[in-house]
Image (cartoon, rainbow, N blue to C red):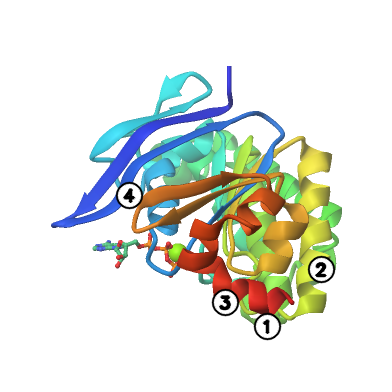
């Protein structure tokens, strides 16, 4: 059974067909990419998979279960985590507290426990702090634990978002333009970082990215969409030479890549 199976996924905003008959089979341990021009529907697909929007058509089967209609926190608890196209950290909160908040979809104590600070509340809060620190140590972020997240350099904040997404112990990690705004050196180290996470945590990673250096350097296969529809798929080198992709999207990006 694949980890994720998407069948005939479609989504309409008002009269606009943002996603049209999108299909994907994702096996455990794969690292794949979703590319295409601005407004193609990439982020919308991630929003459908994570329950931000409810798909108007099709199925999203995760671990054998159709998750269409499930709320985001439930999908997160089931094992799908994501990062956002623009950084969404709590800048005024410490790095550690950013990690702690991310555990919230998993909290098992009730309102009573949190109001009256019962032993169950304390036990769970301790576990959350421990797991947060464990992740920070593993990713070499523990030195920043007490700093406000907004005080970190840009590249570190983008990485921290990925570390934070690991709080839910995901099986599938969705990264929406993780390399946005990075220079080539930063992109190289991000590539190593992503590959290391996949191997270390035995994760499946699906990413959206415009930086061709990262897409071509790290993804095992790609899907290309334009106006909500799939126009090509395959290994990076196949997609790269596909005339339809060159015309719709890669013409400029290929020039950039040299
Ligand atoms: N909440 C919304 N309401 C109405 N239209 C939306 C909404 N979200 C996205 N759209 C539209 O759906 C289309 C797909 O948008 P989406 O954000 O998925 O594109 P994208 O491929 O992620 O683009 P980019 O590379 O610029 O991030 C666009 O035309 C966009 O304007
Ligand atoms: Mg987007």
Residue at label 3? Answer: 252
- How many neighbours does mark 1 have within 10 angstroms: few (below 14), some (14-19), or many (20 or more)? some
Labels 4 and 1 touching (C-beta < 8 A): no
Which residue is the extreme one toward the left?
15
Q: Report whether the residue tagged 2 is closer than 8 Å to ligand 1.
A: no
* Residue 27 at x, y percent in the picture: 63, 29
Labels 4 and 3 touching (C-beta < 8 A): no
Q: What's the distance in space between the residues labelled 4 and 3, CA to CA? A: 24 Å
- Tag nearer the camera, 4 or 3: 3
Q: What's the distance in space between the residues labelled 3 and 2, CA to CA? A: 21 Å
- Tag nearer the camera, 3 or 2: 3
- Tag nearer the camera, 4 or 2: 4
Q: Earlier in the sequence, mark 3 or mark 2?
A: 2
Q: Which mark is residue 101?
A: none
The quadrant of the rendering that contains the C terminus is bottom right
Q: Nearer the viewer, residue 126 or 158?
A: 158
Residue at label 1? Answer: 151
- How many neighbours does mark 3 have within 10 angstroms: few (below 14), some (14-19), or many (20 or more)? few
Q: Nearer the viewer, residue 230 or 214?
A: 230
Q: Earlier in the sequence, mark 4 or mark 2?
A: 4
Q: Report whether the residue tagged 4 is closer than 8 Å to ligand 1.
A: yes
Q: State the image quarter where residue 111 is shown.
A: top left
Residue at label 4? Answer: 19
């Amino acid at each position: 059974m694949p980890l994720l199976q998407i069948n005939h996924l479609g989504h309409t905003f008002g009269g606009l067909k943002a996603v049209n008959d999108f299909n994907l089979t994702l096996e455990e341990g794969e690292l794949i990419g979703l590319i295409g021009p601005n407004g193609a529907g990439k982020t919308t697909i991630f929003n459908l998979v994570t329950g931000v929007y409810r798909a108007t058509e099709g199925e999203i089967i995760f671990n054998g279960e159709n998750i269409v209609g499930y709320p985001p926190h439930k999908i997160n608890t089931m094992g799908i985590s994501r990062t956002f196209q623009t950084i969404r950290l709590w800048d005024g909160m410490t790095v550690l507290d950013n990690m702690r908040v991310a555990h919230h979809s998993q909290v098992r104590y009730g309102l009573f426990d949190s109001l009256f600070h019962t032993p169950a509340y304390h036990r769970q809060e301790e576990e959350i702090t421990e797991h947060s620190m464990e992740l920070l140590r593993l990713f070499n972020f523990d030195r920043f634990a007490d700093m406000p997240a907004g005080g970190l350099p840009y590249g570190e904040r983008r990485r921290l978002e990925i570390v934070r997404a690991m709080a839910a112990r995901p099986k599938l990690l969705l990264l929406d333009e993780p390399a946005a705004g990075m220079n080539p050196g930063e992109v190289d180290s991000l590539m190593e970082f992503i590959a290391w996470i996949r191997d270390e945590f035995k994760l499946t990673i699906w990413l959206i990215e415009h930086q061709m250096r990262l897409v071509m350097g790290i993804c095992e296969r790609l899907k290309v969409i334009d106006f909500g529809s799939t126009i090509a798929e395959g290994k990076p080198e196949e997609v790269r030479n596909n005339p339809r992709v060159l015309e719709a999207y890669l013409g400029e990006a290929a020039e950039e890549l040299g």
